[in-house]
Amino acid sequence: MTGGRRGVLTGGTWCADYNRTVSHWPGEDGLAELFEEERHGGGSSCNLALDIKRLDPSIPVETIGLVGDDDDGRYLRETAIAAGIDARQMTVTPDAATQFCDAYVSLRSHRRTHIFHAGTGALLTPDHFDFSGTRMRYLHLGLPGVHRILDAPWRDEPNGWVAVLKKARAAGLQTNLELASIDRGLMARLVAPCLPHLDFLIVNDMEIGAIAGVETIVDGASDKDACLRAARAVLERGALKLVTVHCPAFAIAITRAGESAILPSIAIPEAEIKGANGAGDAFAAGMLYGLHEGWPLAQCLELAHAAAAVSLRSVSTTGAMLFWRDCLSLARQWGPRSGG
């Protein structure tokens, strides 16, 4: 069925993350103390590529992206190559600085706040995506809402994301779309035309609610029944084989074939948590890895939760990721979260 295809191709956002740990996130005119600062690779394409290679170094990973002819761009290319990622389609342009993001993590809440500069991300177009030579099985694409040209209509398509997804599926790839925390209305408008061209959608509780037009977060807590309704509504709107919804307490996965699984998240000790930056990417990496390897749905969810929990041990997006067996081992030591 897969025609001998193996591996994951990530496409879209590569940015330099300047990860900063602060005492808390202040309001306007407020003051917070900075404790740590580190530079790492960031963005959906970077994070999932690195996470997959750390979950299983034997899995082939390729990437497509656009970086500047600058120090950040060289750093990102070197990061990819050092991890064993095929970066031949990581294009360098002199026309803009590499996209970067100031990622602040609050010690008080462990929540993250991102302030980004689009840079090269604003210049990425569907023409940068060439799938003619790849033998990868999956395309993991992102991020709608932070790429000006891809967000806009492209030739005869409603947006550039649709153009990329259609091209990928025509080349034999199965597709997944990663989302960012953008305005709900904008997210719904950008994602709706993509649904007929997606095989998988792995998103959080807020994102599935925005796409489906369902309130999934009530009084600050994720509503499991509402998340399930939203997931079913989105599944029916496209050609999707699978919709997965995750949040801090639980995750839900449903398939077009009628399978479903619901699992509580991992009760990682508070002392282990350094920041949530990249946890969603880690969850997606665990889920896609399990799907790639043909695991049962509940086992895929178990690894997704484990990978997300393990990732929380670093302020960077990918720095704490481990081999998949080690992720599961740690998660089983910590056990499931109660009340999920």
Image (spheres, rainbow, N blue to C red):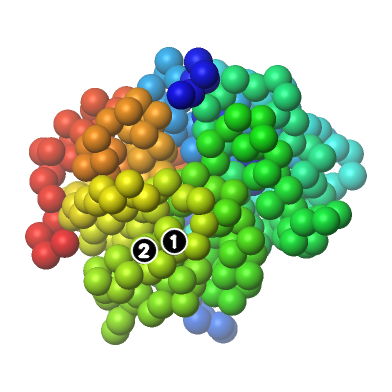
Nearest the eye: 46 or 2: 2
Q: Which mark is residue 139?
A: none
**Which residue is depicted at the point 79% across and 46% down?**
125
Q: Is residue 283 above or below residue 172?
A: below
The percent position of residue 269, horizontal first and vertical second, equals: 17, 51
Residue at the spot of label 2: 232
The percent position of residue 193, horizontal first and vertical second, equals: 63, 61
Residue at the spot of label 1: 236
The percent position of residue 166, horizontal first and vertical second, equals: 68, 44
Contact (CB < 8 A) between labels 2 and 1?
A: yes
Q: Is residue 128 left or right of residue 224?
A: right
**Which residue is depicted at the point 22% across and 50% down?**
261
How many numbered marks does the figure carry?
Answer: 2
- Whether residue 49 is visible to the viewer of this picture, yes or no, is yes
In the picture as drawn, the residue positioned furthest to the right comes out as 95
| Residue type at the position of mark 2 | Arg
